[in-house]
Image (cartoon, rainbow, N blue to C red):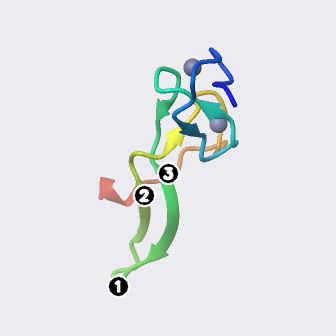
Amino acid sequence: MRCFKCRAEPMGICQFCGRAVCEDCHGPMPFILTIFTGRNDIPKAVVTADALWCGTCRPQPEPIPMPELY
Ligand SMILES: [Zn+2]
Ligand SMILES: [Zn+2]
């Protein structure tokens, strides 16, 4: 398997679309694992900041509100 952009050795698979990406081509995007409601009814998202993203696909059509902005 090769990076779908530059055909280099891939470092992993995009968490959203499943394409292989190398270290130079992947992009930073938090991967939201789950969203839950806490005691104060403030939605919280559990994310992994180091999730692999190919930098091309669009996992969400709209930006997701982040509870950290409260
Ligand atoms: Zn690449
Ligand atoms: Zn992708």
What SS does tag 1 mark? loop
Three-letter amino acid code at disc 3?
Phe
The residue sitting at 59% across, 32% down in the picture is 54
Please state which of residues 3 and 61 is positioned toward the viewer in this rendering: 3
Provide residue 20's location: percent of width, then percent of height.
Answer: 64, 34
Provide residue 57's location: percent of width, then percent of height.
Answer: 67, 33
Q: Mark 2 points at which residue?
A: 47
The residue sitting at 51% across, 41% down in the picture is 52
Say if mark 2 contacts mark 3, CB within 8 Å.
yes
Q: Mark 3 points at which residue?
A: 31
Quadrant into which the N terminus falls: top right
Instruction: Measure how far apart labels 2 and 3 are at the Cα level.
Output: 5 Å
Dividing the image into four equal quarters, which quarter contains ligand 1? top right
What SS does tag 3 mark? strand
Say if mark 3 contacts mark 1, CB within 8 Å.
no
How many C-alpha atoms fall within 10 Å of the one at disc 1: few (<14), some, or many (≥20)?
few
Residue 17 located left or right of residue 28? right
Note whether 66 is above or below 6 in the view shown.
below
Three-letter amino acid code at disc 1?
Arg
Q: Which of marks 1 and 2 is in front?
A: 2
The residue sitting at 64% across, 46% down in the picture is 16
Residue 21 located left or right of residue 36? right
Q: Residue 39 carries which label?
A: 1
Quadrant into which the C terminus falls: bottom left
Residue 66 located left or right of residue 7? left
What SS does tag 2 mark? strand
Quadrant of res 53: top right
